[in-house]
Amino acid sequence: MSDIVHLPASTDPDSICEAIDEHGGVIVDRLLSSDTLERLETELRPYLDACEVGRNQFAGYRTKRIGALMARSVTCRELAMHPLITASSSQYLAPYCDSHQLHFTQAVAIGRGEGAQQIHRDRGVWGPALNRSVETQFSTIWALTEFTEENGATRFVPGSHTWDKDRHPTDDEIRYAEMEPGSVLLYNGTVLHGGGRNDTADERVGVLLHYTLNWLRQEENQYLSCPPHIAAELPAELRSLMGYSLGGPVLGFYSTPGDPGEGVELAPPELLFGSRASDTPSIDDATFYDPVDATTGAR
């Protein structure tokens, strides 16, 4: 069993994707500046302080979790759009989709005395029907504080993305994603992992930003967490990443309710934010992956 691979901040998407292919995950060291970390603390701390702890073992009885980070934190938006991360995610998920999307945003503060979270695979949110030949996610855990074995660093099982789904890790197969503030753990949706036990007096704080295939439903409903009146203030590229865009040929179009003849019909989401119809994809021009022959009905 190998340890978790570490790469420098100067790494590239090829190296990241190769490491995740082989080990299920990788840590990129010191990718964020101290100024960025300070801004994240300033923006997220009021929400974490006001948040209640979890109510079950998986969420953590001494752990605080907040979402809607695209609406709440300008700096989290920068993390979500970090060029190295989005390039790596797009490349890693490319065999399974024509584009990726933001799937989940959460800041997590593991408090003193918290027990270890259940080891799990993130792909479980879609249940057992999705074939494991399809990789579902490219996930990130950004360290805002130091991650150590003692304070709750993510427990991680290198190579477990290749295991039979019913195989459980032994204690000596579990590693800890120890990393300095500003570093990030990158991993796929099939590798086994879980939050660690915090035996220190301090919180272990991280920001989780996960990406998935643009044809899967997102775990966090981005359109409620960051509704259109807030999304209108965001860069168009970030809105698109969140799902305010067509996915595949026609996924995600909208029509507006109202009186006959008012509003729009079968429109791409970009029109909601003032884009011209000529500049956006149209479902009338969609090419389907599995067309039916109009004469024979054959596929």
Image (cartoon, helix red, strand yellow):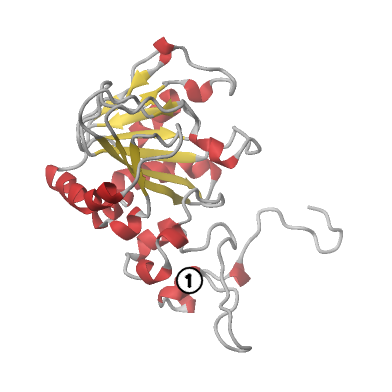
Question: Is residue 82 visible to us here?
Answer: no
Q: Residues within 10 Å of mark 1 (few under 14, many from 20)?
A: some
Q: Which residue is mark 1?
A: 280
Going by the image, does 173 lie left or right of 45? right
Between 276 and 138, the residue placed more toward the observer is 138
Place of residue 218 in the rendered image (x, y in percent of width and height, measured from the top left): 50, 50
User: Which residue is rendered at x = 46% and y = 35% of the image?
Assistant: 56
Front residue of this view, candidates 249 and 138: 138
Classify mark 1: helix, strand or loop.
loop
Residue 27 lies left or right of residue 201; in this view the side is right
Image check: 106 left or right of 182? right
| Amino acid at dot 1 | Thr
Q: Residue at x 24, y 34 (%)?
A: 203
Q: Residue at x 56, y 80 (%)?
A: 264
Task: In the rendered view, tell whether residue 254 sits above or below residue 54.
Answer: below
Q: Position of residue 115 (x, y in %)?
A: 37, 25
Question: Does residue 3 lie above or below 57 as drawn?
Answer: above
Q: Residue placed at 52% from the left, 70% from the top?
A: 268
Picture quadrant where residue 54 is located? top left
Placement of the N terminus among the 4 image quadrants: top left
**Lateral position of residue 151 relative to residue 283, left or right:** left
Residue 73 visible? The answer is yes
Q: Is residue 123 above or below residue 40?
A: above
x then y, percent, for residue 99: 48, 51
